[in-house]
Amino acid sequence: MKIIERNDAPEAVQCLSAHELATLLVLLQAPCDAMAATPDVMALRDAGFAKLVDSGQGTARFAITNEGNAVLRVLGAG
């Protein structure tokens, strides 16, 4: 009998660290200034869960994207 190995996981599964999840929760409550961005914020931006937005005062801030909100809703936090 031939054993066939199956991998049903999606190709682009992204795993977030505990720090990145915590940062996502912080961004939900209060977007942070671009100058105060941590490596976790940058990782969320690269994953598409955070984005730079214009705050209207000539400064840019990081905020959650729709995808970031979806992650938090799945976890029951959004």
Image (cartoon, grey):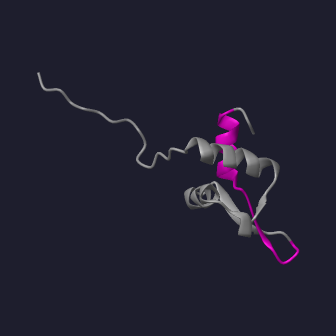
Confirm whether the magenta stretch covers residue 26: no
Figure check: 31 above or below 29? below
Residue situated in front as seen by the camera: 19 or 60: 19
Residue situated in front as seen by the camera: 20 or 5: 20
Q: Residue furthest bottom?
A: 58
Across and down, in percent, residue 3 comes to: 17, 26
Across and down, in percent, residue 48 comes to: 60, 57
Q: Quadrant of residue 35?
A: bottom right
Q: Identify the residue shown where x is 45% and y is 49%.
A: 12
Across and down, in percent, residue 15 comes to: 50, 44
Q: Quadrant of residue 60?
A: bottom right
Q: Magenta span covers which residues?
A: 56-75
Q: Identify the residue shown where x is 61% and y is 55%.
A: 40
Q: Quadrant of residue 58?
A: bottom right
Please state if 56 lies on the left or on the right of 73 as rendered.
Answer: right
Q: Residue furthest left?
A: 1
